[in-house]
Image: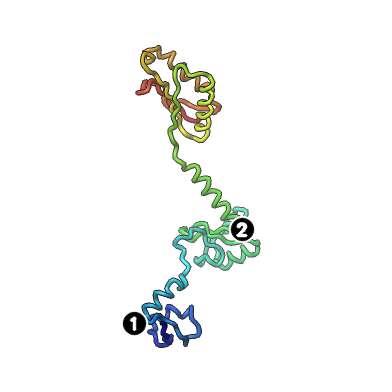
Amino acid sequence: MYKSIRHDSLTQKHSNYTKNIVKPQYIWYYLPYRCTTEKLCNIYLINHFKPLIPQRFSRKNDNRARFNEQIRAKEVRVIGAAGENLGIMQIRDALDAAKAAGLDLIEISATSIPPIAKIADYGKFLYEQKKKQKVAKAKATSVEVKNIQVKVGTDDNDLNIKAKKASEWLAEGHRLRVDLFLPGRTKYMDKVFLESRIDRLLKLLTVEYKVAEPAKKSLKGLTAVIEKK
């Protein structure tokens, strides 16, 4: 149940959709029998071939620096491979200098007037940029407040386990809140004695720390906050 239609019978607007795909110009398209008019045939061809139309390259989502012939400026301020300032040069002269050094000309600041370009290896430049972004992302990680709870009678084994975990959190850059849980009558014990119970844990930490908030009363009993130096 198919019929055929010649390519040259379509309008010029619709034939543009297929000129990069179908060759030669005069060809028979086999279309569903329901395409009874030229308009329906045109609609079918557009819907059929549109996904195959090549898209133009766009730099909208490409954040990589331009290099060599991709640089559009007529003149650039050039930084040499050793970091020396070579001054403002015409783009052709800058490209020749990079080629003579066996390297690439990379646009590192497109918004400057004139743009700043550096003579370097483009592959190595991309690697260094990716490495810097990874370090910056790690530093931008949000700091959390971790919590460790101890009791007046916590034994040494549990205390060592809690101290080990607390040391790991401090090493990662997190703040640490130490809660001394005081049920019942233990709330009325001497404050110096209660603070010494918190100090038992702090003495076992393997990471240098500083007291951000000294021990004070809280809903659970007594709370102190520490952080990495």
Q: Nearer the viewer, residue 190 or 40?
A: 40
Choose top left, top right, bottom left or bottom right for residue 8.
bottom left
Badge 2: few (under 14), some or many (20 or more) residues near its Cα, within 10 Å?
Answer: some
Residue type indicated by callout 2: Asp
Q: Nearer the viewer, residue 127 or 177?
A: 177
Mark 2 = which residue?
121
**Residue at position x 43%, y 87% in the image:** 6
The residue labelled by disc 1 is 39
Q: Nearer the viewer, residue 86 or 182?
A: 182
**Above or below, 203 relative to 1:** above
Q: Nearer the viewer, residue 137 or 28?
A: 28
Q: Count numbered badges in the picture.
A: 2
Amino acid type at image mark 1: Lys
Foreground: disc 2 or disc 1:
1
Image spot of residue 119 (x, y percent): 59, 59
Q: Give the CA separation, mark 2 to mark 1.
A: 55 Å
Q: Residue at x 46, y 70 (%)?
A: 56
The quadrant of the rendering that contains the N terminus is bottom left
For residue 32, which quarter of the picture?
bottom left
Residue 120 pos. (x, y %): 60, 57
Q: Secondary structure at mark 1?
A: helix
In terms of sequence position, does the residue under pointer 2 or pointer 1 come before the other? 1
Tag 2 secondary structure: loop
